[in-house]
Image: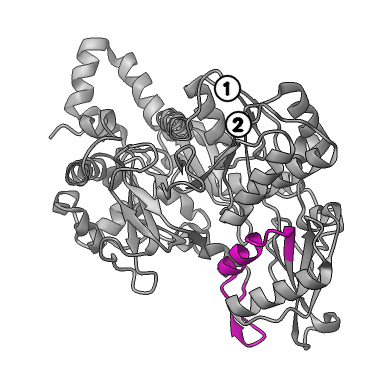
Amino acid sequence: MNTNLLTTQWHTLPEETVRRLQVEKLRRYLRDVVVPFSPHYRALFHEHGFAPDDLHTLEDLDRLPLTSKLDLSSTPEHPNRIRDFLVLPDKKVLSRRPANILSALIHGREHVRRALDAEFRPVFMTSTTGRSAEPIPFLFTRYDLDHLALTGKRVFEICGAAPDLRLLNLFPFAPHLAFWQTHYGGVEFGVFQTSTGGGKVMGTEGNLRLIRKLKPDILLGMPTFLYHVLHQAADEGVRLENLRRLVLGGEKVPDGMKRKLVNLAAELGSPALDIVSTYGFTEARMAWGECANSFGKHETGFHLYPDLGLVELIDPKTGRLVPPGQPGEIVFTPLDGRGTVVIRYRTGDYLDGRLTYERCPGCGRTVPRLLGNISRSTEIKSLNFGKLKGTLVDFNQLEHVLDNVDDVGSWQLELRKLHDDPLEVDELILHVQKINGADETRLAHDLRARLYNAAELHPNRIEFHSAEELRRRQGVGVQLKESKILDNRPGAVSQASAPTSSRGVSPLEPIPDTRSTSTARILSTITTVPESKLTTTQREPLEAAK
């Protein structure tokens, strides 16, 4: 069966054809790459008595166990667990493969060596953000970087970009998927781009200076930071008539936040702004986008790439596949890739809509699409919020409730102990920046009603702040991801990415710079390996990482 059709016609094939070709491609990928060369999956497949050739339909995947973030995390007993998820090729196995033998006869051994080096030797790394645990590194080979560029290019195409546009990348400069997906995708697509590194590198004023000078057509970044930059631009009377599109990533984006960004753009002289969201995660090593001109018109969803990855939806309680058209937790499996590989990775992200193969009403592409809201339940678990004041809380829902209030700009939910006494009751404080000249008394009453209706919560108090004070509280431009929910109870793990003391880091105090130690932690998971057992091809990237 010719699986190349899945790549050349990835955006036009009917569901039946897509699923049939995906099975064939996944079976070949598992047989030729994952099971032979991944220590974790070689052992896992053997333990469960499952061979790649046992895969006949996508439903057969349900026989394989799921992979979770816990499986990737190091423990005292397994300090280098992530290494087991690396594709580490066996030179003897590769030398016996007919395709390599034929290539060596035609092009010579050196040609084959260079090709295998590009395919299997890691040369690049991103990592998880490490908000609630140690960052987990994910390695890319040059083969994987080609895919990163390709998927980035597709995001640009789906979002309706054009090569003559000017793009400004405001994602934080870090080993963070969103930044590098934008960079490689922009280069592959051929658009003019400049990166600011977000707030930590140039600060808000530096970003605004570059915006004034470049007059970009497209801004890409995290929604909270883009809101902050555009709000500051409006306060300073900046005009951005060229601005045509905002592309958002790194955080979920409720419709209320999109409306506020559209309104801010209108204040800046761009009333016809198009706004789109993207969805991605480090473990997939790719991101997906909505199509252009969709907000307020069509529910287009995130357009997937059926030639490069497979998405399943499972019941988060049982781990079993849900029936077609039903909501569920997102599970991802790559169909091609080297470096760090995870199979049937459960994201902890819950889709309240469905996975569909229907033709997109916005762009007309026929691809698998994720429709509905995605709640990042993994982040809620990391906050250690189970019950608050006797009520089970869904903080994903609370974020939608607060972002959808038109008179609220930025906000932060803070959890403390009364009098900072560990034995006292929990206090919930809502910090708010009001906009549109809203009356504080009326707005506070409205917010209390909304919180009660959504989660039966009564905040102990609502405090109003200026935009600048909320920016400081959230860590805008300081942290990789801004803190919209802050746990300042003694001994709690804050959502802030910086380490906390027993009482947490005050959002009004400088946050320690932990970049060098974070990098060291990431590299330590890769480099402390019994190198005497590695081949030269496997050892080189580890030595480079040191």
| Dot 1: element | loop
Residue at point 48%, 35% (across, down): 159
> In this image, 258 relative to 314: left or right?
right
Where residue 98 appears, x then y in whole percent?
A: 17, 26
Could you tell me which residue is drawn at 75 percent across and 87 percent down? 425
- Pointer 2 and pointer 1: residues touching (CB < 8 Å)? yes
Q: Position of residue 9 (x, y in %)?
A: 26, 31
Badge 2 or badge 1: first in the primary sequence: 1
- Residues rendered magenta in the picture: 384-412
Q: Residue 244 carries which label?
A: 2
Query: Helix, strand, or loop for circle 2?
Result: loop
Q: Is residue 294 magenta?
A: no
| Label 1 crowd (10 A; few <14 / some 14-19 / many >=20) | some
Residue 181 rendering spot, x and y as whole percentages: 52, 35
Q: Nearer the viewer, mark 2 or mark 1?
A: 2
Mark 1 lies on residue: 165
Farthest residue in the top direction? 107
Q: Say which quarter of the image contains residue 133.
A: bottom right
| Depicted 140 relative to depicted 138: above or below | above
Whether 277 is drawn above or below 6: the answer is below
- Left or right position of 523 against 458: left
